[in-house]
Amino acid sequence: MKILIIGGTGFISGYLLRELRKKNYHITLFNRGKSKPFIPVDESVRIVAGDRNNPGDLKALINDEAHYDVIYDMTAYTGQQSQTAVDAFYGKTGHFIHCSTVSVYMISDDLRCPVTEDQDLRQIMPFFPRNPFGMNYGIQKRDCEKILRDHHHPVNFPVTMLRPTYVSGPGDPTLRDYFWIERILDGKPVLIPGSGDYSFQQVYVEDVARAFASLPEQPQTVGEAYNIASEEIFTLNEYLAELGNLMNRKPEIVHVDQDVFDHLPFSSNSRGDVFPFNTRRPAIFSLEKIKRDLKYHSTPFQQWMPELIQWYTNRYSGHSLGYQDRDAEVKFASNWSGDYLKLKKAFIHE
């Protein structure tokens, strides 16, 4: 089977590559060649350098290989990128698999949990820059999905889409889990926005990779979209308690009203999500469909999280996002605990 991965050097696509290599497929990676592959590759994997935004570069892949049995698009973030892929590969693949996201739901106000796959087109909420699932990201991923749905054809362009939630595991470039691991390790108070009571799901990266890798063998998935998340559901409070137990630590937790937190200078960062898993609303996704069609089951948190903790503590060098403001976090946590009402009034009426 001939497989093309658009991407292949990133977090999810690296684990996907490792899964696909177990099956002895003929694999081609297409990317700009500017990043070292996350999973080392040998000469059995063909690597083609090019720019996915350049239609000529994509079409050149077809000139070399008349047909790919499966194409994985792991790096489409705009509708135009998906349209370019359609233009290049329509009629040239037996299965086009798109990496989407649960953010296509979480940019809507009106959702019903558990969120089912048919809630992807609900009306978009007024633009909310602090949306923890990414407003622009969700809007653009919806555009990708629309292009692919419009061009889906069971013979000429069979499409399947997976929608992961927060993906965690060794090598995660977002460092979401490390944000909390590093703060628990330093033994200082841990600041929590709001009540910490909203439920959410992560998903282990190897579960995502296995699901993607299984799709070529699952013809019933053609034309479908699937949520993929852990079967375990945590609130942020529960997540931190479980994390502390695994680390033999009991962190001091300080909750700060969300409206006050949003005024704090360290509550946001232009580089990405800080204080992750603060979803601001329930974020629970139905897994009935993926369990039915892919026989999916997730790896237990207690099994994969110790591996991730060890990876961060023994192999990763550097700090989590926003850790340069850790002293300010700790100082505020101390003051907030000591003079709650005075601080609340001061921040809200600034």
Image (cartoon, rainbow, N blue to C red):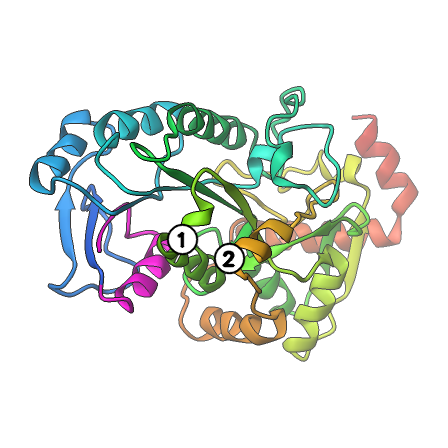
Q: Quadrant of the C terminus?
A: top right
Circles 1 and 2: CB atoms closer than 8 Å: yes
Q: Quadrant of the N terminus?
A: bottom left
Tell me the residue at 45%/64% (across/down): 206
Q: Residues within 10 Å of mark 1 (few under 14, many from 20)?
A: many
Left or right of 73? Residue 102 is: right
Q: Position of residue 6 (x, y in %)?
A: 27, 43
Q: Which residue is mark 2?
A: 294
The residue nearer to you, when weighing 95 against 311, is 95
Q: Look at the image and give the residue range highlighted in magenta.
A: 1-24
Q: Position of residue 10 (x, y in %)?
A: 34, 51
Tell me the residue at 65%/54% (across/down): 201
Q: Amino acid at mark 1?
A: Leu
In the orientation shown, which residue stands out farthest toward the left? 64
The residue nearer to you, when weighing 221 against 97, is 221
In the orientation shown, which residue stands out farthest toward the right? 341
Residue 59, magenta (yes or no): no
As drawn, the label of residue 200 is none
Q: Which residue is mark 1?
A: 215
User: How many marks are shown on the rendered structure?
Assistant: 2
